Image (cartoon, rainbow, N blue to C red):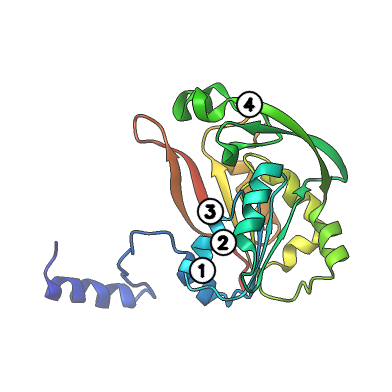
């Protein structure tokens, strides 16, 4: 590790170019993101039983959380956890590119459930016991644009859109239409190698979001293979002021 004097000298040199050295906190940057962009509402799409809402509260977020989950069993657990909790609303629904119905493939570990089929790679890395499809549920699907219009949500509120929909993120982004560009930030799980059949590559989703005016803020691995290579990452995006 460089001495304090050396570090100060390096920082002075970088300051001439408008740069600085900061210590990486070694953790997901969610608390800093929420504060920096003054997030007041979070749409938690693919909530499972509410793990992300717990993460938000741990990060100090005191604003409104709307959690959505289509799987009946997971939604039951979600509703039970949210009961009586201030500023936390739960909805049983799925989002997509168009209105209609779709078959949800419910896996043994139901936080891996998806409208898409797990790939051989996913089954190998996470195991058949977790990824096996145990049943399907026909669920109604709406679009994010329709939902926001129906709920009369104020799109000028500084809202973070979080998507954890197991490879189905692109369809939800498409279903947002022009309203997508009103969100202050996005958090998505994206795969470096497809974990579900038909899942778009990470480069395609990042390109789509850049075209809609979003800039990557940070990313961190959430799934690795046996070589410790990252397979899936959480990505935060923001809209420059």
Does 100 sit above or below residue 196? below
Nearer mark to the viewer, of 1 and 3: 1
Q: What element carries label 2?
A: helix
Q: Can residue 91 be seen in this view?
A: yes
Instruction: Identify the residue position indicated by label 4 in the image.
Output: 133
Q: Residue at x 59, y 59 (%)?
A: 81
Nearer mark to the viewer, of 4 and 3: 4
**In x, y percent, where is residue 43?**
67, 62
**Total of numbered circles in the picture?**
4
Which of 159/137 is in front? 137
Q: State left or right for residue 52 relative to residue 44.
A: left
Q: Is mark 4 on a helix, strand or loop?
A: strand
Separation of residues labelled 2 and 3 (CA atoms): 17 Å
Q: What element carries label 1?
A: helix
Q: Residue 53 carries which label?
A: 2
Give the class, few, some or many, for how many residues have Cα within 10 Å of label 2's Cα (few <14, many ≥20). Answer: many
Separation of residues labelled 2 and 1 (CA atoms): 6 Å
**Mark 2–mark 1 contact, CB under 8 Å?**
yes
Instruction: Identify the residue position indicated by label 1 in the image.
Output: 57
Separation of residues labelled 4 and 1 (CA atoms): 32 Å
């Amino acid at each position: 590790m460089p001495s304090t004097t050396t570090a100060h000298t390096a920082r002075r040199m970088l300051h001439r170019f408008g740069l600085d050295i900061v210590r990486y906190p070694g953790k997901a940057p969610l608390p800093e993101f929420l504060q920096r962009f003054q997030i007041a509402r979070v749409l938690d799409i693919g909530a499972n039983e509410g793990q992300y809402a717990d993460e938000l509260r741990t990060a100090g977020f005191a604003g409104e959380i709307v959690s959505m989950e289509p799987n009946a069993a997971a939604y039951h657990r979600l509703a039970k956890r949210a009961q009586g909790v201030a500023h936390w609303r739960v909805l049983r629904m799925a989002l997509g590119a168009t209105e209609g119905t779709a078959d949800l493939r419910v896996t043994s570990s139901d936080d891996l459930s998806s409208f898409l089929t797990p790939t051989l790679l996913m089954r190998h890395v996470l195991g058949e016991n977790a990824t096996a499809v145990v049943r399907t549920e026909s669920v109604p699907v709406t679009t994010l644009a329709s939902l926001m219009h129906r709920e009369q949500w104020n799109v000028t509120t500084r809202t973070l859109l979080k998507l954890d929909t197991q490879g189905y993120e692109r369809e939800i982004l498409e279903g947002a239409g022009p309203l997508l560009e009103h969100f202050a930030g996005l958090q998505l799980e994206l795969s470096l190698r497809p974990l579900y059949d038909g899942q778009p590559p990470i480069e395609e989703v990042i390109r789509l979001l850049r075209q809609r005016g979003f800039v990557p803020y940070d990313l961190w691995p959430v799934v690795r293979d046996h070589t410790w290579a990252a397979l899936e990452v959480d990505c935060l995006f923001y809209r420059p002021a």
